[in-house]
Amino acid sequence: MSGGLGEFGRIRRFFAPLAGPGGLQLRDDAALIDCQPGKRLVVTVDAMVEGVHYLPDDPPDLVARKLLRVNLSDLAAMGAVPRHYLLTTALPVSFGDEWVARFAEGLGQDQRVFGIHLLGGDSVATTGPAVLSLTAIGEVDAGREVRRSGACAGDRIWVSGTIGDAFLGLAVLRGRYPQLASEERAALISRFQLPEPRTKLGPRLAGIADAMCDVSDGLLADLGHICEASGVGAEVALAALPLSASARRLAAADPELAVRLASGGDDYELLFTASAGASETLGALSAELGLPITEIGTIDKGSRVRLLDAHGNELRVEAAGYRHF
């Protein structure tokens, strides 16, 4: 862009300071990664599109942190510890140096939080909406990675944290729920804009969880992914879903809302199955991490996910989660 730093100027000023040793100060065409003996690398990639995954007015630093965190959530879902990441940006010309500077500041802030570094990437211009893609690399003990395909009939289903707050946060940003107090609205918006990847919990579930994924498309949809990969079915008790105080109060006033919260997406909590005997261990882990881990249902020999009301009747679900196409 005329008068701006340009591609390489932006890289030198904003992104080279984020590079770790393997990134070679972003001066080479590729990075170098050491893999420790007995470890496996876990690699994931996610993209975010302006106007689809975040709102155009969202602060650039929060956009960057969400982009990083949704990928770290994928690593946590396989029991991996985050180590590095690669970044690709396709930005309109209207996104000047100030936007990029704030974006890089957000990345730097979360690099310190999660102990990871930038390895490299690419930057291009676009005439369309901004498109941001991040590839995260983690590390796990070989053979201890947790996949979606290990759920067994009789397993219990567990989820971390609370469900539905991000769905409500997006609704608040769009003008819904004015009856909520300002601090409640702010908390819900934060859950949408700045998810909390469970990077401490994920690796601790290796050897405990039989199958696991994170809740991105919606709890019911993501549980469906586990069931499909494992060749099983599931029953989930609607009343057992962990809701925040705000979500619970809104759902009490609108009984249909609870079902939508189960399929809303963007929670980035960990959803996993484990044997019934893991209950005590999970309770101790929950207390140690200060993070709720709630049992919400059971894996069975069926072939689909059923959401049940308090009387055991199956509830109709219009859409189990977000669909990209």
Image (tube, helix red, strand yellow):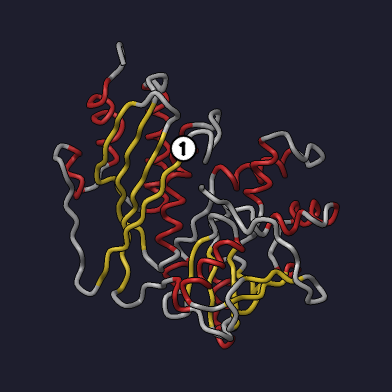
Farthest residue in the top direction? Answer: 3
Q: Secondary structure at mark 1?
A: strand
Image location (x, y in percent) of residue 271: 55, 67
For the question of whether residue 301 can be seen, the reply is yes
Left or right: residue 162 compared with residue 9: right
Left or right: residue 114 compared with residue 18: right
Image location (x, y in percent) of residue 29: 15, 41
Q: What residue lies at 39% left-to-right and 23% top-to-bottom? A: 127
Up-down relation of residue 153 to residue 11 (above or below): below
Circle 1 crowding by C-alpha within 10 Å: few under 14, some 14–19, many from 20: some
Image location (x, y in percent) of residue 90: 35, 32
Q: Nearer the viewer, residue 179 or 52?
A: 52
Left or right: residue 143 compared with residue 54: left
Image location (x, y in percent) of residue 185: 71, 41
Farthest residue in the bottom direction? Answer: 277
Q: What residue lies at 25% left-to-right and 71% top-to-bottom? A: 39
Q: What residue lies at 26% left-to-right and 31% top-to-bottom? A: 11
